[in-house]
Amino acid sequence: MKGVIFDLDGVIVSTDDYHYHAWKRMADDEGISFGRESNKYLRGVSRMESLEVVLRHGDKSYTPEEKRELAERKNRYYRESLNDLTPDEILPGVYPLLDSLRERNIKIAIGSSSKNTPVILEKIGLDKSFDAVADGNDISRSKPDPEVFLIAARKLGIKPAECVVVEDAEAGIDAALAAGMVAVGVGDASNYRKADYRISGLDHFPLDELTK
Ligand code: B16
Ligand code: MG
């Protein structure tokens, strides 16, 4: 292992919850009943694909123009909620793991589907902490396509097979495996049987095993 690529929402910071509340608010506006049980289908997938998942819970049909407006509205709600984001929302185990990886000269990157990645990293004070960032602004295909992770590896200057991905989304685990990388599942993905490693939190990252 020469590099670790971290998903952002749900792995580094708890913005997955902020996404949920913003989609829920938009769904409520539209009279669509959308609940937590369907939230996992929004993890890791792009904004427009997430919108399709939410709209499937209602019975109205929308024109492409209306869909764009709904996605923009959700993003406005989401961006409003990001005003409250602070380093306190960084998930447990992140700082010690990043320190241990740096000590071992292992490169670290972000591989996120989110176009809001730069603002999130700045708000949580980690905008200068990664050797490379690949995000929703770099890609044309979202997870489970491997594109975002392949771009992250290229930016790090290492081969995909030398990378480990940490993900909370099933779509993200599939993307990592499609990239030929080792996939570590946390959070929602800690029960996903396709993940090479399933951990309950970053403090259980299999560092010794992967650096043997
Ligand atoms: P945005 P990740 C993903 O980020 C989220 O998990 C997913 O729920 C969201 O739809 C996607 O980013 C796009 O986000 O609307 O901010 O561009 O988990 O890949 O870090
Ligand atoms: Mg995620």
Image (cartoon, grey):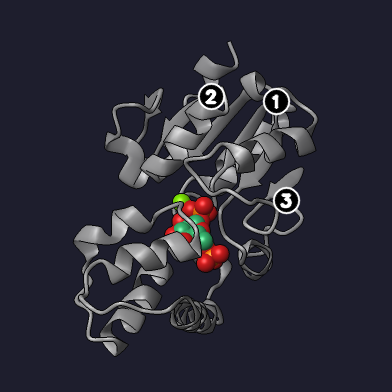
Q: Identity of the amino acid at label 3?
A: Ser
Foreground pick, 96 / 3: 3
Horizontal side of 85 relative to 101 (left or right) equals left
Q: Please, is residue 29 above or below residue 142 in the view?
A: below
Which SS class for mark 1? loop
Query: Is 110 left or right of 67, judged from the image as shown?
Result: right
Q: Which residue appears at 49% of the width and 83% of the height?
A: 69
Mark 1: amino acid: Arg
Nearer the observer, 210 or 64: 64
Q: The N terminus lies in which quarter of the figure?
A: top right
Q: Which residue is mark 3?
A: 129
Provide residue 64's location: percent of width, then percent of height.
47, 75
Q: Is 172 situated above or below 23?
A: above
Residue 89 lies, in percent from the top left, at 49, 64
Residue appearing at x 61%, y 67% in the figure: 116
Q: Disc 1, disc 3: CB below 8 Å?
A: no
Task: Sort mark 3 into few (<14), some (14-19) or many (20+) by Cα contacts within 10 Å.
Answer: few
